[in-house]
Amino acid sequence: MSAPAADLSGADTGLAGVPVTDVSLKRRDFASDQEVRWCPGCGDYSILSTFQGMLPKLGIKKENAVVISGIGCSSRFPYYMNTYGMHTIHGRAPAIATGLAVSRPDLAVFVMTGDGDALSIGGNHLIHAMRRNVNLTILMFNNQIYGLTKGQYSPTSEAGSVTKSSPMGSVDYPFNPLSVALGAGCSFVARALDSDRKGLDETLTTAAHHRGTSFVEIYQNCPIFNDGAFDGYKGPEAAERIVRLVDGEPILLGADRSKGVVRDPVNGSLTVTEVAQVGMDHVVVHDATRPDPSLAFELAHLHDSGQISQIPLGILRSVSLPTYDDMVRDQLRLAGGSADDKPARDAALQQLLRGNDTWQVHN
């Protein structure tokens, strides 16, 4: 059942229709009594703690938050949340979450998945959830490896990765998850880092408030099978290697913000250079709200050329589009009509079921 209008959270957000809480909630209120069983040093611990700490700030009732997962290390998430949730089957979390979002507009639905679960067996379900713009928040933990099955290369493993299933090096080209999401027409696309608690919290909070499909790729360290994959974006090097995206602001980086993302005057592609050499007027200003996703695509591929060592963190795209679940419910209301129309509707349904031709089968 939907909550009364007086109890609703923000009418124009992803939380519209979700009852607000009348008690003060803390992080511990969203933590279950189950022992957290990830490997020591796993980046999932940081994501779990940040997510549990973010939920109270949404102001919604604990009973109206739902966590859905598939299969994999990341998919143990529902066990550790003191909310309703489902640990479902491999790759199918977006499909199950879609049904829940359509049938229960009073719920805030979160999907927890990994690079293998989401982009291999679950790739089809993921892209169609994003294409439909279902009101879901999808967190994809990307450690570039299969962890639960003990170290096989995944759809995001770098080419040449030596793993248990590619002892001579992977010959697959990896997916760029941000590009996949943008190509599917996802209305909210972002990237965060497991160890960047502040940035992760801000990104997840914004994603939860977005109405439509929010896709957040989280770089997550697997200390057992792919340790240090993202070390270049942590510690002293982080300021030089990370491009933090802020909507409406010039895209700057570096400890002293002396470098900027500009367009190459020859081929028009994005590149990084000293601002003093080109002037601030030439630095690209980030616009996550533009309907055309071309800039977001370019930022998603900033690192792929091999010429640039920087990666973007933050929100690449955030646009407002009608949601699948809202439109389905609108159609159902229209088809339902008024109470005065019920006899005619019932008669029409019976006629449809009977059809124009009938047969009697005699023994």
Image (cartoon, rainbow, N blue to C red):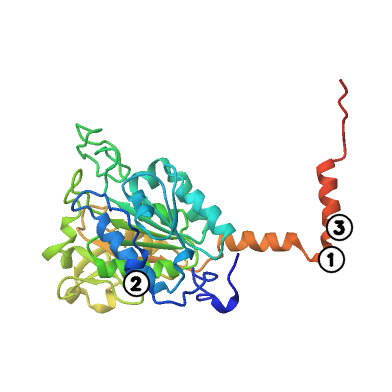
Q: Nearer the viewer, residue 293 or 175?
A: 175
Q: Is residue 190 left or right of residue 193?
A: right
Give the residue type that dot 3 points to. Ala
Give the residue type that dot 2 points to. Lys
Q: Residues within 10 Å of mark 1 (few under 14, many from 20)?
A: few
The tag earlier along the polypeptide, 1 or 2, is 2
Q: CA distance from mark 2 to mark 3?
A: 52 Å
- Viewer can see residue 128: no
Q: Secondary structure at mark 1?
A: helix
- Viewer can see residue 108: yes
Query: Which numbered tag is attached to residue 344?
Result: 3
Q: Quadrant of residue 255?
A: bottom left
Q: At 41% from the left edge and 40% from the top edge, which residue is drawn?
A: 121
Q: CA distance from mark 1 to mark 2?
A: 48 Å
Mark 1, mark 2: which one is toward the viewer? 2
Mark 2, mark 3: which one is toward the viewer? 2
Q: From the top left corner, tell me how far across and down residue 280 is, in percent.
A: 25, 78
Q: At 57% from the left edge and 58% from the top edge, which residue is drawn?
A: 102
Q: From the top left corner, tell me how far across and down residue 94 is, in percent.
A: 47, 51
Q: Secondary structure at mark 3?
A: helix
Q: From the top left corner, tell me how far across and down residue 123 is, in percent.
A: 43, 45
Q: From the top left corner, tell me how far across and down residue 312 is, in percent.
A: 28, 63
**Residue behind mark 2:** 26
The tag earlier along the polypeptide, 2 or 3, is 2
**Residue behind mark 1:** 340
